[in-house]
Image (tube, rainbow, N blue to C red):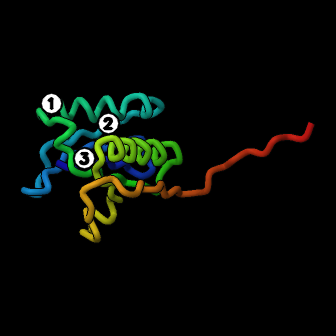
Amino acid sequence: MNLIIDHQQHTDKTTITIFDPQNENIVDSKTVSLGFFMSEKIVQNINQLLVKNEIDKRQITAVIVNPGPGSYTTTRICTTVANAIGYSLNVPVVDITDFKNKKNVITDSKFSNPVLPKYSNPPVITQKRAR
């Protein structure tokens, strides 16, 4: 099973999908509006979807993530969660664009490289004020 984490640009909605690559069909999908609680609730929502469909986390063979562009926080949280799940389960993490275009989709069965976020704008980092 593939776990897909897809945040929608310019909204606070994130879609979590379980995809069966053998049959090429969606097992289940859930769109959530997590807003300010995304970092607290995204993993909980992933777990709920897996439990609801009686899928053990060890059945996940890849994690597909939308790395952006999008809001800084949403992009950062989605890619971090996807990479953490991929690393902890030792499964590949794939950019959703490559997955949709079927380019170099899943060439390795193990975690090798994290997917890096693609931000709409560079992060704004404030400079220390002179004292």
> Circle 1 sits in a helix, a strand or a loop, which is it?
helix
Q: Amino acid at mark 3?
A: Leu
- Give coordinates of residue 10: x percent, y percent: 45, 50
Residue 106 to residue 8: above or below: below
The residue labelled by disc 1 is 52
- Which residue is located at x 49 percent, y 58 percent? 118
Compute the Cα span from label 2 to label 3.
Answer: 15 Å
Residue 71: x and y in percent read 50, 48
Q: CA distance from mark 1 to mark 2?
A: 15 Å
Between residues 34 and 54, which one lies in front from this camera angle? 54
Question: Which one is in front in this view, the residue at disc 2 or the one at disc 3?
Answer: 3
Q: Circle 3 — which element?
A: strand
Query: In percent of the image, x 28 and y 40: which residue is there?
Result: 31
Name the residue at 21% across, 37% down. 57
Q: Is residue 4 above or below residue 95?
A: above
- Report how far apart the C-alphas of labels 1 and 3 lie in the structure: 14 Å
| Rendered image quadrant of residue 58 | top left
**Label 2, on which residue?**
32
Which image quarter holds the C terminus?
top right
Q: Classify mark 2: helix, strand or loop.
A: strand
- The image's mark for residue 120 is none
| Depth order, front residue of 112/38 | 112
Residue sitting at 39 percent across and 33 percent down? 34
**Which comes before the other along the chain, label 2 or label 3?**
3
